[in-house]
Image (tube, helix red, strand yellow):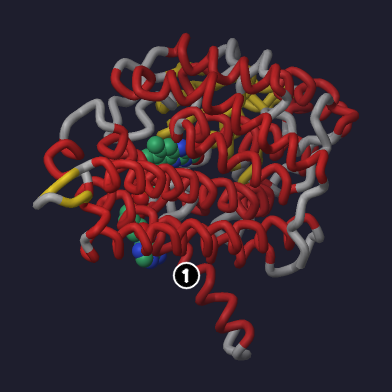
């Protein structure tokens, strides 16, 4: 495995890092303290203009045609600069645009991808419901076909970008007689914002990633043209979304990695500045061992993210399991690291407006979104059982 970048790619990464530091990071605190739709939309538009939102989408649809390895190297810079902006960009690109790119028909790709790549339109994925998140196969939203339309009825929960999105990938079940497996009939639809019968809930007031707007979506016989079934493949939604999560989970691993990296940098800086008992606190083992653990998370985390992305670039069979390993490993460690970073800041770390206080709240989502830690362990265990011949 060789992750070395060409000179041109190194310049690209440096430039994107500077863009994130100059344009995104200075807005992160305000986005957390007083989140507005306008601010996050502006950030996403800047990222669209920069070419980041469409980076992994093929050039023929307005994207950058970038490999997963290179895309995730860039992504870490954004996640480090502002976790909220990164989460919204992730839902937009990996869960919506990439869903259409992976499974859409040629017409769907040509219609939706160019404006998603440019950031003119914002995307989201609506899978979770009030009665199911981990157990997506149990979803209750129904889709009934009448002539050239499907009518969707149900409630979707916690949709990242819900309040600002134009294009929604919605999972709903087309019920047919004789369905035996519980994920049968689940179908992915492309639903546009002004669809008759669809309403967007108010943004949630969240613990962290407060700048990334999250809402419920209410569907009451929402009228969706039959040509908006993703890939024209009724009943394939469950398999499709699982494949999308395989790459989305690398994205969420990078979310945690970026935060761990920000914790490391803040801790290194502060521990050199803060004097206690006549010395910088960096001189004390209890402090610098915490920093060592953060460094390990960042170095090992980056390695496992790149391995996972590299496997996805090659379409390798175990790429999804590796994504679960990456997400689980970094999410757990990053949460501990954020707690340690706050500890290094002492009382100051507990005060709103201190960066580590925000990171401490943001980081927890890495252990919940796109499959909790418990679900990742189940995925990895299933793979092990197969290897051992038990499944
Ligand atoms: C900020 C935010 C953004 C989100 N964005 C999106 C989005 O864009 N689109 C979307 O569709 N969803 C989104 N979600 C939803 C998220 O994916 C779910 O919250 C997550 O998958 C967990 O589902 P749940 O909340 O229903 O928890 P549950 O499934 O009810 O789980 C509750 C607890 O039980 C555990 N558990 C459940 N089943 C098992 C099991 N079999 N074995 C062991 N433990 C188990 C879980 O690990 C967890 O600890 C978002 C959530 C948040 C908080």
| Quadrant assignment, res 60 | top right
Q: Is residue 296 left or right of residue 385?
A: left
Q: Quadrant of the C terminus?
A: bottom right
Q: Residue at x 73, y 28 (%)?
A: 228
Residue 92 image point, x, y percent: 60, 30
Q: Residue placed farthest to the left in the image?
A: 277
Beta carbon of the mark 1 residue lies under 8 A of ligand 1:
yes
Residue 53 location, x and y as percent? 67, 28
Residue 237, placed above or below residue 19: below
Tell me the SS state at disc 1.
helix
Frontmost residue, 187 versus 243? 243
Drawn side of residue 154 relative to residue 345, left or right: right
Where is the N terminus found, in terms of image quarters? bottom right
Q: Is residue 290 above or below residue 68?
A: below
Circle 1 crowding by C-alpha within 10 Å: few under 14, some 14–19, many from 20: few
Q: Nearer the viewer, residue 162 or 172?
A: 162
Q: Does 326 sit above or below residue 256?
A: below
What residue is rendered at 43% in x and 19% in y?
27
The answer to whether residue 316 is visible is yes
Image coordinates of residue 281 in percent, x first then y, are 21, 52
* Residue occupied by mark 1: 378
Residue 207, how many percent across, how many down? 27, 35
Quarter where residue 169 is shown: top right
Residue 131 appears in view? no
């Amino acid at each position: 495995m060789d992750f070395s970048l060409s000179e041109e790619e190194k310049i690209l990464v440096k430039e994107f890092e500077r863009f994130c530091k100059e344009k995104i990071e200075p807005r992160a605190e305000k986005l957390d303290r007083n989140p507005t739709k306008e601010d996050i939309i502006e950030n996403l538009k800047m990222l669209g203009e920069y070419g980041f939102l469409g980076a992994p989408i093929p050039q023929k649809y307005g994207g950058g045609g970038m490999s997963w390895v290179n895309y995730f190297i860039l992504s870490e810079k954004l996640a480090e600069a502002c976790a909220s902006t990164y989460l919204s960009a992730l839902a937009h690109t990996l869960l919506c645009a990439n869903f259409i790119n992976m499974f859409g028909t040629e017409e769907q790709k040509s219609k939706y991808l160019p404006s998603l790549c440019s950031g003119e339109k914002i995307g989201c994925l609506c899978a979770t419901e009030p009665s199911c998140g981990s157990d997506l196969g149990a979803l209750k939203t129904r889709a009934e076909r009448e002539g050239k339309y499907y009518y969707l009825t149900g409630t979707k929960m916690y949709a990242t970008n819900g309040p600002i999105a134009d294009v929604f990938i919605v999972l709903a079940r087309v019920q047919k007689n004789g369905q035996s497996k519980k994920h049968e009939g689940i179908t992915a639809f492309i639903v546009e914002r002004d669809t008759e019968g669809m309403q967007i809930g108010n943004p949630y007031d969240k613990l962290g990633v407060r700048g990334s707007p999250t809402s419920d979506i209410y569907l009451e016989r929402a009228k969706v043209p039959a040509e908006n079934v993703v890939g024209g493949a009724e009943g394939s939604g469950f398999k499709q979304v699982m494949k999308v999560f395989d790459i989305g989970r690398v994205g969420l691993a990078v979310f945690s990695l970026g935060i761990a990296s920000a914790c490391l940098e803040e801790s290194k800086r502060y521990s050199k500045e803060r004097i206690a008992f006549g010395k910088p606190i960096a001189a004390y083992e209890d402090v610098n061992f915490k920093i060592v653990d953060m460094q390990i998370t960042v170095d090992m985390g980056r390695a496992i993210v790149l391995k996972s992305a590299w496997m996805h670039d090659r379409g390798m069979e175990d790429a999804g399991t590796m994504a679960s390993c990456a997400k689980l490993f970094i999410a757990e460690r990053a949460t501990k690291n954020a707690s340690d970073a706050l500890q290094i800041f002492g009382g100051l770390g507990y005060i709103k407006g201190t960066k580590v206080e925000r990171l401490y709240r943001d980081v927890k989502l890495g252990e919940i979104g796109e499959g909790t830690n418990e679900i990742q362990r189940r995925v990895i265990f299933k793979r092990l059982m197969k290897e051992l011949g038990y499944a």
